[in-house]
Image (cartoon, rainbow, N blue to C red):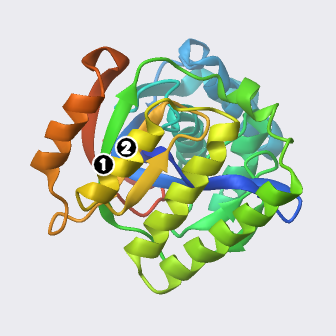
Amino acid sequence: MRRFTVKTPGTCGEYIQGWYDGNPCLVSSPIDRYSRILIEEGSGNLDTLKPKTQKLVEAVFRRFGIPEQEAEHLHVTMTSEIPLEKGMASSTADIAGMAAGLSAYFNLGLTPETIGTLCSSIEPSDNLMFERLNLFNHISGSVLTEFDGTVSADILIVDFHGGIDTMTFNETQDDYGPQDLAVFAEIVAQFEQGVRSNSLKDIGAACTKSAILNQKRLKKNYLDCLIGLSRDFGGLGTVIGHSGTVIGIMYDNDDFQEEAFCKAFKKFVPDSVYAEIYHNRLIPGGIKIITETV
């Protein structure tokens, strides 16, 4: 019996997100918090999957002409460490992982580009299926610019209460004026330079500017406070869920005064406004698959 285990990272939102060269776009920030899927031969249970995941399965079957009867022998088990409706790519991780798993199971040879397009046909999607960073049109699934590198750093993520419907949020993202477009073009250039030169300082600065720009579209009440605390205690920059509620502080263990930061954070941010604080790692993206015969 064939068995495929799929491991897909979530994100702390996006390093940057805006409009560039006439396109809505983003660069996701993958973290070591995962969606896991087990696909194996057995009694079919696809009708028990979440609606978006079911749509992805239907899209793959339709695109590749897979007989519907095959679904009767496909058993799927899904688990996830990624909180829902926080801007941490829980849905994208699920549907991208499912696409990759079906590709392995049916030997379809899906590339990250194809998986990105399939996911974006279901909903606006993050680009966590790519190992290397790129500027991604999350509506059409096209890659606008490829960056020469990845990001590795620690991140402290504040999970604020509330949730955001990504579909609704992205329907309203066409109101960028000329000044915003110019600012975002500068953000993209600084981010690209930071990745090319492996400068976490430049990357973090670009992320913080993108977070501030996003305040016009989805205001985060404690963003200014966290940007200030990051600066005061050695953080590298602020990464947000542009269509979510999380705010993350990038840092390097050698320079970040974490104990002092947390003490100040508790002074200025009431316990009642956030659910949890996560300590994670910013990692390269990409979907991992383990194949077994049992």
Which circle marks residue 23 in the picture? none
Q: Is residue 259 above or below residue 36?
A: below
- Tell me the CA gap for discs 1 and 2: 5 Å
Which circle marks residue 226 in the picture? 2
The crowding category of the residue bearing disc 1, from other C-alpha atoms within 10 Å (few below 14, some 14 to 19, many at least 20), is some
Q: Nearer the viewer, residue 135 or 290?
A: 135
Q: Nearer the viewer, residue 113 or 101?
A: 113
Residue 272 percent across, percent down from the top left: 31, 14
Q: Residue at x 58, y 49 (%)?
A: 212
Residue 127 percent across, percent down from the top left: 61, 53
What residue type is disc 1 on?
Leu
Q: Is residue 241 above or below residue 178?
A: above
What residue type is disc 2 on?
Leu
Q: Residue at x 34, y 35 (%)?
A: 158
Cβ–Cβ under 8 Å for marks 1 and 2: yes
Relative horizontal placement of residue 16, taking residue 5 as reference (left or right):
right
Q: Residue at x 60, y 21 (%)?
A: 72
The crowding category of the residue bearing disc 2, from other C-alpha atoms within 10 Å (few below 14, some 14 to 19, many at least 20), is many
Residue 135 percent across, percent down from the top left: 67, 64
Which of the 4 quarters of the picture holds residue 21?
A: bottom right
Quadrant of the image containing the C terminus:
top left
Reading the image, the residue beneath label 1 is 229
Asked if one can make out residue 137 in the rendered structure from this viewpoint, the answer is: yes
Quadrant of the image containing the N terminus:
top left
Which of the 4 quarters of the picture holds residue 78?
A: top left
Asked if one can make out residue 27 in the rendered structure from this viewpoint, the answer is: no
Where disc 1 sits, the SS reads helix
Q: How many marks?
A: 2
Residue 181 percent across, percent down from the top left: 80, 60
**Furthest residue to the bottom?**
197
Q: Residue at x 59, y 75 (%)?
A: 190
